Image (spheres, rainbow, N blue to C red):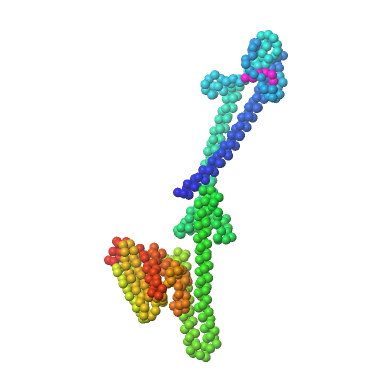
Amino acid sequence: MARRKSGSSIIFRLGVERFLERLSLFLALDLLLCVLFAGAGLWVVETRAAGILADAQSAEWTGAVELGGWSVQKRSAADGAQPPPEWLQGLLPEESEQAGRRLSWGVSPSLAQRLRGARYTLTLDTGETGRERYIVLTAEIGPVLWAAWVCLVIILCWQGLSLLGACIGASRTYSRILRPLWELTETTRALSAGEKLTPEELQKLSSALDSITAGHLDARIPTAKLNAELRPLAQAVNQMLERVDDAYRSQMRFVSDASHELRTPIAVIQGYADLLSRWGTEDPATMRESITAIRSEAAAMKEMVEQLLFLARGDNDSMHLELENVSLAAIASEVQREIEMIDQTHVFVSDLVGDGIVYADAGLMKQLLRVLVDNSVKYTPAGGRVTLTLRQEENTVRLSVQDEGCGIAPDELPRVFDRFYRADRSRTRDTGGSGLGLSIAKWIVEKHGGWFEVTSSVGIGTRMTVCLPAAPKESAADSESA
């Protein structure tokens, strides 16, 4: 709606400017035609009248006669016609420059009859005494004026239609020209809002941005001096550039962290490989130690690469979710049985109330719980307890994993979900974690419309709570009956 209003506003303004420009051109042309017609007509009339006056003065006649289409009379009194100004007399023929002139119209109230009855009268004072002192010439110019009026009306009608057509054509042209700007505005707003775009919309955005170049991603378009129509476009582009800049910085930081994390296992593998090449064939113990270390580091690298691929697919939104009604209680019990089989050094306790039915991807829910349990196990001393708790509210299912580990400092809590971040850096090599598990867990939870609640006390432990929307009651009942 906003785009339509702003688009209509700018098109209307441009259309008005185009209309006024062409209207002024037509008015100037009409004025020029009227001046040319009046000047040419006056020149013809005055030239003809001068010749007739010369003939009338030299001829002997009385009464009224017709000469060259003019009615010529001799009168004893003037008819009130006034001579032209002195500056104009110099432009008139010498024979008639002193003659008075008068333009009269028809007596009918209609414009057509008044024009048809128009007369042009010249009255010349001969200076003689007697009853025939004045020579009066009268020309019927009504038909000529009527024809000129009809031509003017036709021209005005043509100009009006031309103006209307020009306005319609200009509106379509401006709409076509401004359409890429509107599409760019809407598309950048969609990108800023994180909405999905079709390939066609992305192609439109690509075409619209072909002419835009930027030397720095931190550059922004100034919006203070832009008009109301272009300001939303600039703001949308700035928002998109902000997201691109953030994504680029995040990617650079991610690549830097990944390179740093991979450097250590690669160095360890290279060191043990050198050790094998020197002493492995002669010392069986050295060989076994090297092979074990290389396998361990290779497994850690494999896990890290798999997690990186998972996050990359998540960032590209290319991961397909198999959504169905899932019982978090059943998944928690299954994960607990699995971890108890491979870990005999910790105590695992479950407090699961209700089934905790959610509409989610079962595989990702299991992966989520494994990440949380594995993270708790890594930072809980041997003999410590890991507790799984499930509670179901009206519209939310809350699944918690609590440990008895070292805890997390309050200033580090906001960063626990950052990629490659570890709260206890001194235990990195001992725990074997990559620092990507909680990032994956957060992505899974947010993909299902949920969120995390984290509470921790240093020296006491940490509780990670996953909050997910509960499945509709009807759907959950169908799942339980099935």
Q: Nearer the viewer, residue 400 or 328?
A: 400
Magenta range: 97-102
Q: Position of residue 386 (x, y in %)?
A: 36, 75
For image coordinates 56% across by 20% down, the residue present is 106
Q: Is residue 113 left or right of residue 375?
A: right
Q: Position of residue 453 (x, y in %)?
A: 39, 67
Q: Is residue 77 left or right of residue 245?
A: right
Q: In the rendered image, is residue 212 in sight?
A: yes
Q: Position of residue 397 (x, y in %)?
A: 34, 65
| The image quarter in which residue 145 lies | top right
Q: Position of residue 57 (x, y in %)?
A: 70, 14
Q: Is residue 236 magenta?
A: no
For image coordinates 47% across by 46% down, the residue present is 5
Q: Quadrant of the C terminus?
A: bottom left
Q: Nearer the viewer, residue 434 or 301?
A: 434
Q: Is residue 404 above or below residue 244?
A: below
